[in-house]
Amino acid sequence: MEIDLPTLMLAGSFITAASGVFLVFAWLQNREATGMLWWAAGNFVLAAAVPIVASKDIVFGMPSTVFGILLLNISPALIWAAASACNGRKPHVSGIAAGAVVWLLAFSLPVIREQPAAQVTLNLAVICIYFMAAATEFWRGRAEPLQSRWPLVVLLFLHGLFFLAGTIDAALSDPETLREAMIGNWFKLIHFETLVFVVGTAIFTVAMAKERAEHRYLEAARVDPLTGVANRRAFMETAESLLRRCQMEDAPLSIVLFDLDHFKAINDTFGHSSGDRVLQKFTALARDLLRSTDYMARPGGEEFAMLLPGSSRGAAYVVAERIRAAFAEATCTCAGDGHEIRATVSAGVATAGPSSTLDSLIAEADRMLYSAKAEGRNRVKTGERTIEPPRSPDAPMVAAA
């Protein structure tokens, strides 16, 4: 059974428009996902363009045909804009309009205006470039762990290849047979393939927006909002995983527990907003001194924990001492009155053994931390050696105008 072109064209326009409505509805449920709105616009423009350029009475050079081809150039540009928006980049109007402008300028030349084959070739080439650019845009954002991204990359790339084949075919076609080819089997095939593309991309675009929202919720549940490092839940999960991996690989794993000295006095003296600044200052200093493979968390209050995979007890001691010394030298501006707060921190270090459990490792580091507190604070305790810092006043902080 052969489906005639007008029927396929009508079905294609209806399904494309319906996919656009589906994307708009999905956007209303998640308005941060602006990429769906751009993609819906691309579908609406395509749904309007197809009936114009797919008519049996098409005459190249007529205003309606020119308008339809311009819409065909704008539709994939909007898809490219959607890909940019999905990656968090703002689409540029100049980039969206570039394809249509290039085609229109070329059409103004007699050599292009008088040759339908050249018009079709240029139109298909512009469409191919936009779809390939959209596929590349999604590929650039592959660092974000979204599984639904990959079907979109594949669909866009294959769709772009399809139009590349059409570009080559139109460029090599006999001008006398071009019209018959357009309304014949090739044009039916491109309509059918576009139906698959439109439906598939609408589904996976919505899936990606949903997956991203769920990923953000999960990340928010694992991150301390004040300091931006992991919270207790994320720390425990990561520590369990790292401990198992290091024991399997017979590699060292050290943990360092930090606790800011006299932190309650800082809050009582300077206010909780100033205390928050001290916590953020410590976080920033520690991050600068840690490796990219190290893991930092704030289990709660003024306590911080750091996982140092591949670090022996001695190496972890050196890292902890650097952080302690840097923090002891740093000052933090007090909120409100402009005073400067100078605080200190104590630390306990523990290193995992072949039979260590996470509970035993944390308990050992906690025991070392409390030992450092008992011995005068502002020091690092490892169980083997203790750093003796320069003599400092017993006061919890020094405030200077």
Image: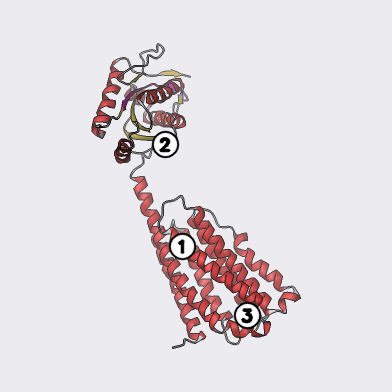
The secondary structure type at the circle numbered 1 is: helix
The secondary structure type at the circle numbered 3 is: helix
Observer-nearest residue: 160 or 25?
Answer: 160
The secondary structure type at the circle numbered 2 is: loop
Tag in front: 3 or 2? 2
Q: Is residue 243 above or below residue 146?
A: above
Residue where numbered disc 1 is placed: 152
Magenta stretch mostly in which secondary structure?
strand
Splitting the image into 4 quarters, where does residue 132 fall? bottom right
Sequence order check: which comes first, mark 3 or mark 2?
3
The answer to whether the residues at label 1 and label 3 have Cβ atoms under 8 Å apart is no
Distance from the alpha carbon under mark 1 to that under mark 3:
32 Å
Which residue occupies 47% across, 59% down?
Answer: 34
Distance from the alpha carbon under mark 2 to that under mark 1:
31 Å
Residue where numbered disc 3 is placed: 64
Q: Say what amino acid the circle numbered 1 marks.
A: Leu
The outermost residue toward the right is 110
Q: Which residues are magenta?
A: 337-350
